Image (spheres, coloured by chain):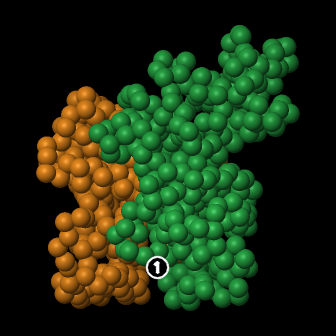
Amino acid sequence: MKKCYLGVDIGSVSTNVIVMDEDEKIIDTLYIRTQGKPIETIQKGLYKIKERINNEIKIAGIGTTGSGRQLGGIMVGADVIKNEITAHGVAALHFVPNVQTILEIGGQDSKIILLRNGILYDFAMNTVCAAGTGSFLDRQAERMGIPIEEFGDLALKSEATVRIAGRCAVFAESDMIHKQQMGHNQEDIINGLCEALVRNYLNNLGKGKEIKSPIIFQGGVAANVGIKKAFEKILGQEVIVPPYASVMGAIGVALLAKEEVRKSGRTNFKGFEVANSSYQVKSFECDHCPNMCEVVEFFRDKNMVARWGDKCGRWSNVEVKNTKLA
Amino acid sequence: MKITFPHMGNTYLPVKAMFDDLGVDVITPPINSKKTLEIGTKYAPEQICLPMKINLGNYIQSIEKGADTIVVTGSCGPCRYGYFMEVEREILKDLGYEVEIISLEAPDGDIKEFYNRVSQMLETKNIFKIVKTFKNAFGILKKIDEIEEKVLKYRPYEKNKGEIDKIYNHLIDQLRKSTGSKEMLQYIKEAEKNFMNVALEKRQDVLKVGIIGEIYTIIEDFSNIDIGKKLNNLGVEVHKSHSTSGWVLEHLFYESIGRSREKDIRKAAAPYVKTMVGGHGRETVGNAILYAKEGYDGLIHIMPFTCMPEIVAMSILPKIQNDYHIPILTLIIDEMTGEAGYITRLEAYIDLLRNRRDKFQNEKMLSWS
């Protein structure tokens, strides 16, 4: 029996599952769209992974990350529930030990992580605006009727510069429409959008930060070669896209899970049966005080396993049954 | 006359004690909640900062409970706060509420006018009585601030989790129900005794983080997603750079004299900001430097969305981060009630501080630049 570790990254746009063996080699990766249904997506992900990996594999540990990490962690019985910034840092250090800068662009958020001498040194994450994130590109691609997968290659074909305002997604959109009406060709506009996103990212997150090489570019948007080229052009430095760029968060948290299990000696993983259980979420508005917190109750096979969402702890502190599945 | 006032942290407790001592009818606005914010957002200008939205919500909720007079401290306008009252006056008028508004400030240094406004509010011209009541209320304010400071400092060290919260929540509950400063002092004394008995343990792994930035969002825990408690739960000792008693001292008494801490802050900030940039922008920079010199592991800068003075400070902070080797995280606060995004940032930030501390525990901080 081969011992393996699972990493699950439940993001706003995609959910990624990876399988890693004892020697920290990546055996399998899976990238599926979350589509606003994290529970079903996690189940689907685990089910698919189980089908794909060999039965000789024993899961020795599991970790969750991403914005759905708490929910996912409760579902699967995670050994580690870690924020995505730390997870991305850990994974990047694993592949490029001397990495100094990580550019990470996901669906709803983007971050810059600086590392020095192998430790997290500084980071910044976008605050109130989505203009420097993947969903900005997603939206514009949809508007132009181009599959997002082809976006990057089209950008590479561009020969002329078209400058598009990247400060705000709304401004960018009207600017883009204006440029389209002026008759610019599509490749140039797409390239302009890529550069707008990169400019916005660097102006927002890169402000006052020393971007030193080696620079790694990861997250879902790293698959877009147009953005990589735009980064290299604007930074004037080489940007590396590592082999598993889109699932780095999941890899990071699998590494952390391995570490945790080494310390604790056991895993809390509830088994692949999780995929077959039925999960239900109920929510209600607590009327105990004017905060009217939206309390969420999480059921597995009709048993409540967790409750959260209240400010005061009146609901979430209540002991709930949390038994391990057979 | 039924007086009301806006919320800012626990300030309502001493304010209520003051009016109770003088026998003035007072209506404390309901504790800040989503409802308050909802009302405020509906009637306040869309682009205004969060504090005004919450203030306005407070007033309307109090008026609905029967208040007819609003008392608020003015500040002669170092930031938009100085104009809140005038804008709010118009908004309330448009909404058809008939209320009297007393703005406690001394316009152009006019002390007589200040006294007139105070005596109008307190329904007495007896200066001795006024001074004595102020003094008592201020005493309570200072005590509560001290307790809050200790709670944020010691919570990560408690042996039995939740013990401090229990005493603290019980105290606030009692203060809420009491009438007058005498009764309040009694309860405070009791709580102080109970705090002394809380078992603490020595922990080497507790980090120290200072909170800098805009005063309202620092003090009012409803607006800052109760950041102090969240950090405490992550094993972090917290100190806030602003307190209400500090503000009162600075604005009502020591402005002209120049208290030593204020002087230190300005002196520290001087190489980066030489003049007042509105609000507490300069103080944010100065406090960041003082905290760094005092050996804090990290700093969290919080401000409401669109706060100009803090935007100025924010643009200077990366320089301080480099010069003093202290990581600074900025959190911009608006009316979002979803906390997940903030929690992710806080957790990652604390991981970062821990990593740095582990790495450099026994060696001198290396210089990157």
Q: Position of residue A271 (x, y in %)?
A: 60, 75
Q: Is residue A76 above or below residue B49?
A: below
Q: Is residue B206 above or below residue B321?
A: below
Does A125 appear above or below B71? above
Residue closer to the observer: B313 or A140 = A140
The chain identifier of the residue carrying mark 1 reads B
Residue B138 placement: quadrant: bottom left
| Disc 1 residue type (three-letter) | Asp
What percent of the width, then of the height, locates residue B18?
Answer: 34, 75
Q: Can residue A321 be spotted in the picture?
A: yes
Observer-nearest residue: A83 or A60? A60
Query: In the shown orientation, is residue A223 left or right of residue B366?
Result: right
Q: How many marks?
A: 1
Residue at left offset 35%, top offset 51%? B352
Local crowd size for mark 1, using a 10 Å CA cut-off: few (<14), some (14–19), many (≥20)? some
Residue A242 in the image: above or below residue B59: above
Q: Secondary structure at mark 1?
A: loop
Q: Give the chain letter for green.
A: A
Report which residue position mark 1 lands on: B25
> What letter labels the chain drawn in orange?
B
